[in-house]
Amino acid sequence: MKIVKPRITNRHRFRQSIIAMACSVAIMPSMAALASEHSSLTAPTQQINPKEQTVTSSQARFNKEARKPKGSSRLAHHVPTLESKSKTVTGLPGMVGAMGVGGPEAEVDPCNGYSQFDGLTGQALYDFVRQAEFSCISELYSKNDATSIAAYQAQNVIDVANLAKANAATYDSTSGSEMLNLFYFLRGAFYIEYYNDGLTYNDTLPADALRDLLIEYSKNPAMSDTGAMQGNTLQEFFISWDSADSFYEAVPAITAYLNGFSESHLAESQHRSALTKALTTLYNGNWDATYTKASMEYDALRAALLKVATSDYIINSAYNWESTDAFHEFGRFYEYQEYWALPASLKTDLNSGVQTYMNKFERLSKEWADAAGYLDYYNPGQCEAFGICGWADELENTVLSIQYSCSDTINIRAQEMSNAELQQSCDLMGGEEILFHDILATGNQPVADDLNTNLEVNIFNSYDDYDQYAGTIFGISTDNGGMYLEGTPSQVGNQARFIAHEATWTDEVLVWNLRHEYVHYLDGRFNQYGAFNYFDIDTGKSVWWSEGLAEYISHQNRYDEAVTIGRSQAFTLSEILSNTYNSGTDRVYRWGYLAVRFLFENHRADVDALLVHARGGEASEWLNYINDTIGTQYDSEWNAWLLTVSSNDTPLDGGVVVPPLDSDGDGVADSDDAFPFDPTETLDSDSDGVGDNRDAFPLDSSETIDSDGDGYGDNSDVFPLDATEWADENGNGIGDNADANNGGGTEPVEHCGATTLNDGNLNQEQVECVSGAGTNYFYTYVAADNTQLYISTAGGNGDVDLYFSQDTWAGANSFTAKSVTSGNNELIDVVANRGWVYVSTSTAQAFDGVSLKVSLTAPATGGGNNGGTTPTIVSDACATLSPYSYGGLAFGEAICIADGHSSYYFYVPSDTASISIDSAHGTGNVNLYANGSTWASPTSFDAKSENSGNVESITVTSPNEGWYYISADGAPSSSGASLVVNVTPQ
């Protein structure tokens, strides 16, 4: 945990969430694909991790501590955007995934006698360097030894630079590597001078000599060449300006390169890297007073940056980060204008350039929002002038448009998740919470002054979306796998939140690090008193606990990677208890896991004692207990334990299985409960969405209600409110029991003879002779929406049932309408929409000689519409109306359904016989849910319709007077669907 004040250099400053905990997670393995392109030259044998420069004034050139070099390798991998170096550090980044290797293995001795550097000076050293293998020079960096010190004596640096200067303006670096070698060798001087106490420059003469060489080389006509060798040379050239602390002097050369950058440059990987190095040099100039104070002189530089940032050939390429990086360096001049109180005309010019960039992109895109952030932050109160008022909230609400409540303590905001995925995430956190309280023995008692009663979980659709939007919306760095922001828990109204993304690269995990980060929330609320960093992450010995516990609870005893690493016995327990976030990924997370597990398994009393201090806010006592009571006494035991600990599936508590989640408290675990949030229901045997307790026909998915109690469900009962009648074979409105002439029509059709079609296309108005012993599948094409179809069977032997579906193969478990009377006289009349529709015949016993027909007119023979009521004709409201997502409905008036989750309501009059709720038209898939007592949703309904496509229908008989609720939910999305509600009075 660390409290860090955001630097003004961060473009994601627009929401300064300054208290946070970085997630302890790896970016997905595919993150390595984002690594930068490699040069064809041999890389150094050792990847050196450079320290960050902290020069704040050009006068620091005399101060060795201020002159931190930018690294040893010219092949540092490109991160997704340059700006990742300047984002607000609101928490230290966790386990970053593999970003590539440092390069190929070096030769055993590429210098053919590395020690010969010891005796070379002046002309001899110059001649040796310009002809040496690149990997030979790399050894000076990687060895950083007495030979390196000898080679980089001040006079050697000055002599080599001056000799190189003599040829710099004319040397053909388009094909030769001499200038490349010389730049690389010379900038290494400042790397060794910083990292090796045996070398100190007492003045700026070495740096001045390098600067003069760079200025001279800027005159070389090869500067404009687009070849690979020149690209390699320019990479070293641009980095060397930084090494010489000559940012101001670098401006003309960088400006010229940016102005000349073309599609030919972009096509060459070495030039793409050179462009990144040029922009990186400008970025590092952020700390140099001479460079930043002279910003008014850089009109040409800013114009060149804007040219690169707005070039379509870059924006529309696979390398569009170059546009983004150039724009960030353009926008950085806002900072300099403000810091040095430079003329307002500079800000005016910057505003104009930012608007030019913004207009290249779609509103609310990553780039548009990036630009809006600059305008908003540096021009407070002027949003109307730029057309961006409320942009941040608009962006957040648009991107994270899905809201889902798991419980009183967890709310999810998501970019794109199905209800099933949302509920899965809720269940995971619910189970994690039970385990946490059981293992930590919290008694569900929060620490004092903690008002973080609920957690907001924000889930982006992918890492790309997280990287694109999370920084702007939440003000966080995104070079990680997610982040927990605790805020100030003692502050009323504080909102703890976790920002995450879906794990699109694996099917094993839905939301990356959800378990781990939820433990951070629970740990902060129930174990650790105070805000983030109350127990100091640098000196308070708290990192091992925070990250180790999150790993321990989320992985439990199955953590193969940690156990494997532990076998090395690389660290003592006392060393791990001293972890900080600078200790490295494995040590912070995997070794932290091992430390927590060791203490829980072998020394639970120490864990309990530490928890007393943690919950009491006793930071000093916590530290003293670790230093004095634990100390080093367990180091030997720890070493032995590391060789025996195993990765296994034993429950954490040693055998007592944590009870499963039971959200509604009905005694049935959520995983086994068809209605986990309804204590009155647990089973849905026929999977019709109505619980067995309320379902009059719990084994018949086509029926749920029997209003008249005659044993026939309302859907198949022609007289659902008359217990004495259920069928009307001749359709004359008189029930068969009371109708002496209930047969009606002509005599049944006789056996049709030989089978003409077993499955396939049904031609309308053509009778087919069918037979079968199971299910036969047919289809027919409907030419227009709202077409009345009559599908009938008659005659023959056996007992056939008939099913129809608008969108998918019809069958007993997939239908829009059906006719399932006794015998073979079946009839479905249905309003169908344009496209292929599906019909099936089905039987439990063999049938034959049955006539099957699809017609646009009602048949003269056959059953009396056994398919139930005629479906409602739904007008295409979306043709004339805008999508409508929330509000009241008028009976008989169709509305256009908005995509996502839409909620509607209407008032049911007294003496209502039935309500019909129908949808049709459009593309995608929408489901309907109805509820007579509260807001309807996929988890709260009395009735539902979940057919494939947008044709849905719900009929509610004998509804109570009062408000009634409907939800329409895209599954996962729909477009152009219309909805109408009709009421039938008694």
Image (tube, rainbow, N blue to C red):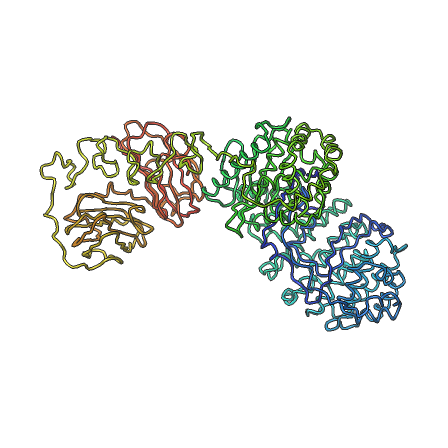
Q: Nearer the viewer, residue 563 or 745?
A: 563
**Residue 381 shows in this picture:** no
Q: Residue 896 appears at what percent x and percent y?
A: 39, 43
**Is 372 placed left or right of 247 in the picture?**
left
In the image, residue 247 sits, relative to residue 127, either above or below, namely above
**Is 247 placed left or right of 100 in the picture?**
right
**Which residue occupies 37% across, 40% down?**
928
**Which residue occupies 27% across, 48% down?**
804
**Is 659 placed left or right of 47 in the picture?**
left
**Is 8 placed left or right of 914 in the picture?**
right
Snapshot quadrant of residue 937: top left
**Residue 977 shows in this picture:** yes
Quadrant, the N terminus: top right
Q: Residue 472 appears at what percent x and percent y?
A: 62, 45
Q: Residue 948 appears at what percent x and percent y?
A: 36, 48
Q: Residue 828 appears at what percent x and percent y?
A: 23, 46
Q: Nearer the viewer, residue 868 or 891?
A: 868
Q: Nearer the viewer, residue 208 or 876?
A: 208
In the image, residue 561 sits, relative to residue 175, either above or below, namely above
In the image, residue 617 sits, relative to residue 175, either above or below, namely above
Q: Nearer the viewer, residue 358 or 60?
A: 60
Q: State the count of labels.
A: 0
Quadrant, the C terminus: top left
Snapshot quadrant of residue 14: top right
